[in-house]
Image (tube, helix red, strand yellow):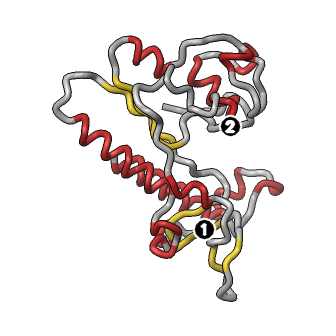
Amino acid sequence: MKMMKRQALCAPSRNSLLTSRRPDTLHLYDFYSYWRDVAGNFTTLPQYFKQHGYHTMSVGKVFHPGVSSNWSDDQPYSWSQYPYHPSTQKYKESAVCSNSDGTFGKNIVCPVEVHFQPGKTLPDLQSLQAAMKFLKERQGSDQPFLLAVGFHKPHVPLKYPREYLKTLPECPAVKDQRMSVSWSPISNGKHRSMCTHTHTSVGKF
């Protein structure tokens, strides 16, 4: 399935996808408005499944967190149980990226040694484990379920396990397909390595 953004911002795109309405129907283009209060009390995709007997669960970043989802990820309307958010997401802006001089900084591109990170993990790794735990717990249940899993990457800062740097070399051929203003030979291979990490996480469950 080809996925495309509905709007050039996170919250409006998620609101559009999850309510099945175009951004120019919702008229919400920011992070500061809850669509049920401002645009309309629309039935969301997970809410529809929930109303038809499904157990619905949200893991990670599905709705945009904060006021745009009523500080609850649209709970209890959309989800049968409280949405899961990884505890280490609170370290998103922490200086945990190793620099060449041995110091730690807040870098946009940030390959890390996972066991040295707060909690010895990363948010998306926590979400992966939570999703796999949910699937295991649902084994043997006769009730159908809908599991929505939202990984934070590729969202800056681009933190991912350092070993993924070895999976993909730089790709000079891509440069010919992009405008020079958007091309970064320094970060391209690192960004692709981070995407490989996310794709691997999706494949695991």
Q: Secondary structure at mark 1?
A: loop
Front tag of 2 and 1 = 2
Which image quarter: residue 144? Answer: top left
Which residue shows up at 49% across the image and 51% down it? 86
Vertical placement of residue 175 versus 7, above or below: below
Residue 10 is tagged as: 2
Q: Position of residue 50 (x, y in %)?
A: 40, 18
Looking at the image, the residue that sits furthest to the bottom is 101
Q: Exactly how many numbered labels are in the figure?
A: 2
Which residue shows up at 24% across the image and 42% down it? 136
Vertical placement of residue 27 versus 1, above or below: above
Please name whichever residue, 168 or 121, is drawn nearer the observer in this view of the structure: 121
Determine crowd level at label 1: few under 14, some 14-19, many 20+ residues with C-alpha closer than 10 A: some
Which image quarter: residue 31? Answer: top right
Residue 136 is tagged as: none
Please name whichever residue, 59 or 17, is drawn nearer the observer in this view of the structure: 59
Which residue shows up at 32% across the image and 26% down it? 145
Amino acid tagged 1: Glu
Amino acid tagged 2: Cys
Which residue is under mark 1? 170
Q: Is residue 135 left or right of residue 29?
A: left
Q: Is residue 113 left or right of residue 50?
A: right
